[in-house]
Structure formats: structure tokens, C-alpha cells
Image (cartoon, helix red, strand yellow):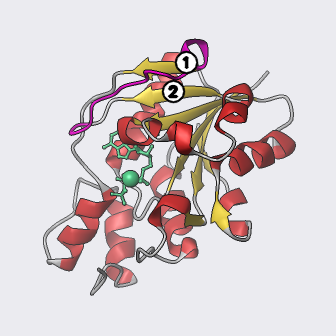
């Protein structure tokens, strides 16, 4: 049975915090693969200016290309409407029959999980792995213990919000995101004049 990690995110843009989380969880749980799934229109970011899905997808491909264990899925960006994790997991179960799913979330995201669509069903579809994140307290209180595991990862105080703000201000983002992503942002003039 394939042990498949699922790293969901807006990835606007993908950064080294995401990559370290995926890598640590893969090592800790002996995963065969981690599939990065860029969201379509994120439910919790309605009304915010989110970069074109195709740009976020391509940056994620560039960032993960050198790791043979990392792949990228289009399921969320090709689905119409808002992105719900329950749909992500359903689609992956169809495209990857027999895979055992491990959904990876940071401390800030796991806190909200009970507010996600079909929260109860989520826990039956995947094992959840909550990773530590600087600036956020990791609490899994109230979540089913046997379905939610906690992993402490090397602390990288990086967020996409900060990368966007730095780009907009003309500050460097080298070493916060992979080199290819720095170059993609410059080439496509992303994050200029975004709110
Ligand atoms: P934004 O600031 O736009 O919300 P972000 O940096 O939080 O971006 P997301 O795409 O929202 O990135 O996050 C995807 C997933 O990765 C979430 O589960 C989030 O908690 C986790 N994550 C993001 N950055 C880190 C980090 N530095 N360390 C650990 N987990 C992280
Ligand atoms: Mg976030």
C-alpha cells in the first residue's frame, strides 16, 4: 500500500517552510510520496487577492522538481468553485486507489479543521499530521487522537504573506523560497501592487 502524504496549500508562493514540513513528515512516517495540492479558490481567502492558479501551480512544480518523492496535483485547481479539503481527499482516493493518505497541516490550519466542510468524514479519509510553526501554538485538543499526529519540525519563520510583502517592497526573497521561485516571481512580475 502506498503511503501518500498530501500537502495542501495556497502556495502563493510556495516557500521553504512548506518544503521542510513535507520532507520531515515524509521521513517521520516513512511516506513513499508527498503530493502538493495547490488550492483553487481557497475558502478562507475569499475576497483576498490570490495569484492565478496556474502561476501558483507552476511555482510549486518548480520548487518540488528536484525531489523524486515530491509531486504536484491539479485536482483542486481543475475543480470548479471553492476548494474544500474533503473534495481534495475524495478526488485523490479515486485517482490513487489503495493509497493510505496522510494530510499535512501547519499549526494554524489544524486549529480550524473542525470548521472545515464534512469535518467528521475527513478523519475517516486520512491520517492528519499537524506540524509546528513559529508564531502559532500547536493545539490538537478536541480532535480524534488516533487520527491526528503531531510532528515537531525545524522552525522556519517564513510565510507566503511575508514573501509577497517583501517582493512588493523590493526586498530580497532569496533563501526564503527556492531559487527557481525567486526567478519565476521576477520573470512574471508577481506581487507588484497586490493588496
Ligand atoms: P499565507 O501567509 O498566504 O497564508 P502560508 O505561508 O500560511 O501563506 P499556506 O499556503 O497558507 O502558506 O499554507 C499551506 C500549509 O502549510 C498550511 O497547513 C500551513 O499551516 C503550512 N505552513 C506554511 N508555512 C509554514 C511554516 N513556515 N512552517 C510550518 N508549516 C507551514
Ligand atoms: Mg496560510
**What residue does disc 1 label?**
29
Q: State the residue in front, 35 or 92.
A: 92
14 falls in the magenta region: no
> Which of 55 and 178 lies nearest the eye of the viewer?
55
Disc 2 to disc 1: CB gap under 8 Å: yes
Q: Magenta stretch containing residue 137, yes or no?
A: yes
Which residue position is annotated with label 2?
A: 129
Residue in the image at 54% along x and 21% along y: 148
N-term mark: 2 or 1: 1
Q: Residue furthest top?
A: 146
Between the C-alphas of marks 2 and 1, the distance is 10 Å
Q: Which quarter of the image is occupied by the C terminus?
A: bottom left
State the residue at coordinates (32%, 59%).
160
Q: Nearer the viewer, mark 2 or mark 1?
A: 2
Q: Is residue 164 above or below residue 85?
A: below
Q: Position of residue 158 (x, y in %)?
A: 25, 49
Residue stretch in magenta = 134-147
Q: Quadrant of residue 135?
A: top left
Q: Residue 122, image x and y in percent?
A: 68, 35
Question: Under tag 1, what secondary structure?
Answer: helix
Q: Is residue 49 left or right of residue 135?
A: right
Q: Quadrant of residue 161?
A: bottom left
* Other-residue count near label 1 (Cα within 10 Å), few / some / many at <14 / 14–19 / ≥20: some
Give the side of residue 163 with respect to residue 93, left or right.
Answer: left
Judge whether residue 15 can be spotted in this image: yes
Disc number at residue 8?
none
The residue positioned 50% from the left and 48% from the top of the image is 66
The x and y percentages for residue 124 are 73, 26
Query: Which of 51/148 is in front?
Result: 148
Amino acid at each position: 500500500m502506498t503511503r501518500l502524504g498530501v500537502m495542501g496549500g495556497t502556495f502563493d508562493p510556495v516557500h521553504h517552510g512548506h518544503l521542510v514540513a513535507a520532507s520531515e513528515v515524509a521521513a517521520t512516517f516513512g511516506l513513499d510520496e508527498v503530493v502538493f495540492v495547490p488550492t483553487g479558490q481557497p475558502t478562507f481567502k475569499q475576497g483576498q487577492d490570490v495569484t492565478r492558479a496556474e502561476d501558483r501551480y507552476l511555482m510549486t512544480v518548480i520548487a518540488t522538481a528536484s525531489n523524486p518523492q515530491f509531486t504536484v496535483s491539479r485536482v483542486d485547481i481543475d475543480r470548479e468553485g471553492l476548494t474544500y479539503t474533503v473534495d481534495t481527499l475524495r478526488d485523490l482516493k479515486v485517482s490513487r486507489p489503495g493509497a493510505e493518505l496522510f494530510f499535512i497541516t501547519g499549526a494554524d490550519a489544524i486549529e480550524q479543521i473542525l470548521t472545515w466542510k464534512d469535518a467528521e468524514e475527513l478523519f475517516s479519509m486520512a491520517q492528519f499530521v499537524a506540524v509546528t510553526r513559529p508564531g502559532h501554538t500547536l493545539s490538537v485538543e478536541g480532535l480524534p487522537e488516533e487520527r491526528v499526529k503531531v510532528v515537531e519540525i525545524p522552525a522556519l519563520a517564513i510565510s507566503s504573506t511575508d514573501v509577497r510583502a517583501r517582493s512588493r517592497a523590493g526586498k530580497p526573497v532569496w533563501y526564503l523560497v527556492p531559487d527557481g521561485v525567486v526567478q519565476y516571481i521576477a520573470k512574471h512580475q508577481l506581487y507588484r501592487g497586490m493588496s
